[in-house]
Image (cartoon, rainbow, N blue to C red):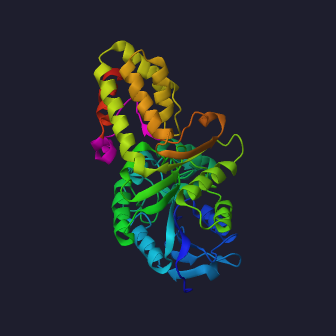
Amino acid sequence: MPKVTEKEWTVMVYLAGDNNLDSAGVIDLKEMKKVGSTEQINVIAQFDREGKSIATNRYYIRKGGTLAKDVVGSLGETNMGNPRVLEDFIKWGIKNYPAEHYLVVVWNHGNGWNDENVYRVARNMMKLNIKRRGEVVLPAKGAQKDSVSIRRIHAIGGKKFRHALFHTSIMKAITIRGIAYDDDAQDFLDNIEMKRLLGSTKKILKRKIDILGMDACMMSMAEVVYQLRDSVSLTVGSEEVEPGDGWPYDRILAKLAKKPAMTPNDLATIIVNEYVASYPANAGVTQSACDLSKAGLLASAVDQLADVLNSHLSDAAVRATVIECRLQTQAYDTPDYIDLYDFCNLLENKTGFDDIRAACSAVKNMIQRNGVVIRSGYKGKNVKHSNGLSIYFPQKSLSSLYATLDFTKKTSWGKFLERFISYTRRPD
């Protein structure tokens, strides 16, 4: 391991590739090697490849050469969905590659706030009669008799099958970029685990992590930024699903290498800009950087909006307006996630009540006018009303897990959703 003194930045990339994104992980590491570590930047990574026989390696990324020469540690097979494994990687990085600033990228962690156990859902949904080219998908070892192995589906399904099956049945997370899945361990990180491990990291640093990057799907949510507010200064993530290509690491690192003394706000902005610029005009991608020091103020504004809406919900005309705005609001691959600014903007313009208008305006101000979102961008007509931060707004049923989030405990948004759904749900 090379001897490293304190630098301006240490970039830590945690690649949970023990799933169908294994090859994408190799591509991203090669992108990092186009720039590599410099006199002022450390670029390190931990990569868990697909298969139990392949070791998890730690890398000190250098420009050029082979990945094998960048290996500085081998851990054997690991469960990258275990929060202790990520925590250990971050602690190792801080100890061995100290820096003024830290960017921690959790690659392949996503699905917003929703921590439903995707593997359990998958096994309950995939039945024995699933076939492709006449081959039956068999149950997983030790699983229920009517369930199947996710790896087995990958193996015989092919790209078209995977897209159709996973995109519709497993919360639309695996095919593109989803939760930090470890198929061998059948585990993944959830938002409560992330909060705990980042809190532990804060104790070591004696300050917050500068930037938490989520190279994954649908993580730029009000619920997520509030959950992580005490241990992270800035987040960078997407409201929408991310294509398999993810972040353009070569472009981002090239900008950082050119100006290593840049501030965390500057780097977060560059990540957003370079990500959006790297995709074609019709890609349907989003990315945003959020200042978590404003998350509490945003939560208070949403709480006030929820209280005001609750006070008017007995009015059928108000309910009709809310429904109309909800249907017109920018939504994402998980349709229960909508752009919070867009919803408030529509409602502010359509309602006849001053208190609702004022509450909507306050939320909008806390998103974009010196608020949480410091930079946002998109490409594609299907996401053109994206403003950087989404929120959970289901129309038919409320997940029981939603109550476990800090955001739900702090605000009345969950109570508003419950009451709104009770009015709009079709009677049994």
The quadrant of the image that shows the C terminus is top left
Q: Is residue 372 above or below residue 188?
A: above
Residue 280 lies in magenta, yes or no? no
Q: Is residue 298 above or below residue 19?
A: above
Q: Is residue 380 visible?
A: yes
Q: Is residue 265 above or below residue 40?
A: above
Q: Residue 313: image x %, image y %?
A: 32, 20
Q: Residue at x 58, y 33 (%)?
A: 385
Q: Residue at x 47, y 39 (%)?
A: 367
Residue 401 lies in magenta, yes or no? yes
Q: Residue 306: image x %, image y %?
A: 33, 30
Q: Residue at x 34, y 67 (%)?
A: 200
Left or right: 306, with 346 as reference point: left
Left or right: 251, with 132 as reference point: right
- Decide which of 20, 270 is in the foreground and name it: 270
- Decide which of 15, 131 is in the foreground and name it: 15
**Which span is picked out in magenta?**
390-410
- Decide which of 270, 334 is in the foreground and name it: 270
Left or right: 112, with 8 as reference point: left
Q: Residue 254: image x %, image y %?
A: 68, 65
The quadrant of the image that shows the N terminus is bottom right
